[in-house]
Amino acid sequence: MNNLKLFKRQTVNELSTFYSFLIGFLIAIFIGSIILLIQDKSPIDTFSLMLRLSVGSINSLSASLNKAIPLILAGLGISIINSVKLWNIGAEGQIFLGAIAVNFIYINTQINSPSIHIFVLLVAGFVGGSLCILIPAITKVVFGVNEIITTLLTNYIVFGVTIFLINGPWKDPKSLNFPAAAYVGEEVFLPTIIGKLSFGFLICILFTILAHYLKNKSVFGFEMRIAGGSAMTAVYAGINAKQKAFIAMLIGGGFAGLAGAIELLSQTHRVSTGISQGFGYTAIIVAAITGMRPLGIFLVGSLFGALSIGGSVIQTIGVSAYIADIIQASTLFGALIIQFFFTYQIKKVEND
Amino acid sequence: MKQYILEAKNISKTFGNVKALEDVNFYLRKGKIHGLLGENGAGKSSLMNILSGIYQPEKGSIFINDVKQKNLDPESASELGIGMVHQEFRLIESFSIEDNLTLSKSNIYQNNFKEAYEKYSEIFSLSVKPEKTISQLSVGEKQKIEIMKLIFNDSKIMLLDEPTAVLTPQETDQLRISLGTLSEEDEKTIVLISHKLKEIREFTEKVFVMKNGKMVAEELSTKDVTDDNLIELMMGNIQKSIIDKSNTPGDTKLSVKSLEYVDKVNNFKILDNINLEIKAGEIIGIAGVSGNGQVELANIISGIEVDYSGKILINNKDVSRRGVRSRKKLNLSYIPENRLGVGLAPGVSVLDNSIVRDYFKTRLGPHLSRSKTENYLESLINKFSIKAPNSKAEISTLSGGNMQKLLMGRELISNPEVIIASQPTRGLDVNAVEAIHNLLVEQRDKGSAILMISEDLDELFKLSNRIHVMFEGKIVKSLNIDDADINNVGLAMAGIIE
């Protein structure tokens, strides 16, 4: 009797994640095309329109990159936490709490220099994100509670808090009953660099380099890998695995919180439910596709930013914006499947 | 002629290239308790797994009540009344005792559980209510439930794989009485696997001995056979060392003073008054069957386990309250028995695993330079001739021998003053064993003080200057290598001390 069995490959091509992303993306475009054809729309027309309106001009390109900022930052946070083999599903909540922290500090402080003021608010966003993941981090480290569940649940709690604040204490009387907090003053708006491209994009580049260094070049990154690989090896090596997990979670939460701060200071300018449109969840896809590599997250995050801008503009020709979501999700599935074949080999074996 | 309830003839089984069983014969008489003796890896568990249908033999036949059994699988074995208690419990921790006992479809006390439970809890002198969940029970109680499960499943042949390994002496005594009752009153046929001669002698009527996958003695009458006989059968001939041991040891590098360690959960003394002294340039061997406190001893000396009483001195410096890292800074190296999982982190690259010991020293860190770490790994690979696909490959893609060489190399490259090597060659092929032995001797000649924990007597006799035997948490015998022989070490390992 012949049987198919899986064997782990001895060596995996270093660029395998990149190749599987590319192939996964092609598969996603293919799936997207089929769906468009079913709707009697031309895939070529639709995709070329998407391309033109997302990267075709300085304005559209900067809109795409602005969209990419929260995806990249939250994705980086997820990848840092994954160094200790933990999953952060709570980036969405961390983005919101980052924005809430910014507004809280904005309301309660008086700083005259705008640049210092903006800096303080960005720090507040980072701290807000860390605070959001603090309880999951404590329950993980002290009681061993599954962080996937707790980080997911904090999303709902933070969303509830947001709804409460914008309908209650922070509700802007000038908003014509639309639930939102008051706008922050123009003096704390993040400046733009080129076109509409926010200064946040520079922060994003800086934090990508930081995350890359932290994960791949620092002693802390090494300690996180060992702690994630085997708790016993960590003890043996004198590494405090729980401490590493705790710090990694706070840093990762902070990255997402910073995304919320940038979103508030450069896009929405006020706390509302529009602070995030599921960025925290899309960031999970971005991080997973790249195998948790910061530089990959930067590239794929940028692409996904362009995709959602492209998705929103093609509504004008009667195509649903969900086509962008479908492409994003199919890319992940495609990439994961291809990655599987890079990691494993299928062989026929004689059964005894 | 219904002389035997079970007969296994010419059973052979190979795993990969390893012959686990070779033409093994095994006979069981109804209502008797049989002992099965042998070192670790002799093939006892493989044979039991074949009888209970978990493995299929390549060759040989099994007769139950004179009926030849073809394609024995766990289900048919259980229907034929063969049940096994494995070394690791197979109870559902979150279920109650009653649920666990009545879980199987072959259970016979579905309707009169209460009476049956009362009867057998008396035989096992077990005083817990059947509503209690398994996780609330002590190890000894769980063991009793495991054996009771066989009775409830109507097993007539009960295979017990080292049931006493987890029991206290009092519990062991109790188990002896319970098993005696079962064999006499219920006519249960029982097989007891054990390392301990004393138990084999007290529990059983007939004894079988295995060595290296072969049955070297069949159906000896326990009354008539001597301990020396059994030890010789079990361990065979052992060559004394060919390694030069004439070097004179230097200063004391490691001393362990009146070490005690208690397992707080089960209130069980795992280490009891351990005293050791190791000088520069000598290898001290710790002999003993695993599970007699060796892992805990190594963990305490290396600083992993901190909750103990007693003193550890490295180079006459008291490090009893110091952590892993400060002991490493005093140049202590630990090669743990659990290669992948403790010594090496699975899922992590060869490169990362190669720097686990020295990464916090300034020559590699604090900024972890890629070129420095690559050079470091390169020097390990060259010096210890390790075969690895590339530095980024995941550690478990290496062979066992290469993993161990990487681990040893990492721990030895900085010329440590004290080395603890736990089961350094377990599971390795002949060439790798030779390479590891040479490394240890070379290190000894460079002046390291080495503590080698091993179950392999060949290895202990070959390398050690002195052998301590551990049994139930105590050092029960200490011998210079010239005075040690297979009998006095073997008997002490089996718990027999004159």
Image: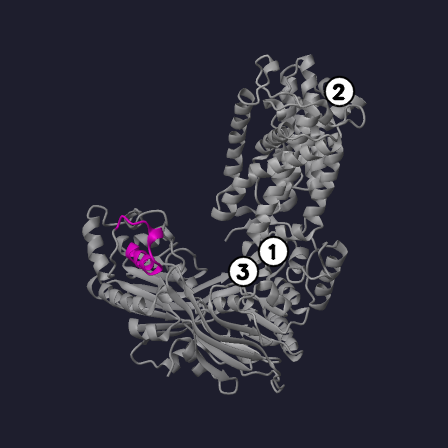
What type of secondary structure mainly makes up the magenta span? helix
Q: Is disc 3 in contact with disc 1, using a CB cutoff of under 8 Å? A: no
- Vertical arrangement, residue B371 with respect to residue B468, above or below: above
- Place residue B31 in its image quadrant: bottom left
Q: Secondary structure at mark 3?
A: loop
Which one is nearer the viewer's eye here, B82 or B130? B130
Instruction: Look at label 2 and name its amino acid.
Output: Leu
Find the magenta span and give its range.
B130-150
Answer yes or no: are tags 3 and 1 on the same subunit: yes
Please say if the residues under marks 2 and 3 sit with CB atoms less than 8 Å apart: no
Mark 1 sits on what residue?
B396
Residue B491 place in picture, x, y as percent? 41, 79
CA gap, disc 1 and disc 2 = 48 Å
**Amino acid type for the residue under numbered disc 1:** Ser
Which label lies toward us, 3 or 1? 1
Going 63% across and 42% down the picture, which residue do you hit?
A: A251
- As helix, strand or loop, the secondary structure at mark 2 comes to helix
Q: Residue at x 68, y 64 (%)?
A: B386
The quarter of the picture where residue A207 lies is top right
Q: Which residue is mark 2?
A: A53
Q: Is residue B335 visible?
A: yes
Rate crowding at label 3 as few (under 14), some (14 to 19) or many (20 or more) other CA atoms within 10 Å. few
* Relative height, residue B281 to residue B46 (above, below): below
Residue situated in front as seen by the camera: A176 or A216: A176
SS at mark 1? helix
The mark nearer the N terminus, 3 or 1, is 3
Tag 3 residue: B16
For badge 3, the amino acid type reads: Gly
Residue at mark 2 to residue at mark 3: CA–CA distance: 61 Å
Q: Chain of mark 1?
A: B
Q: Is residue B453 left or right of residue B494?
A: right
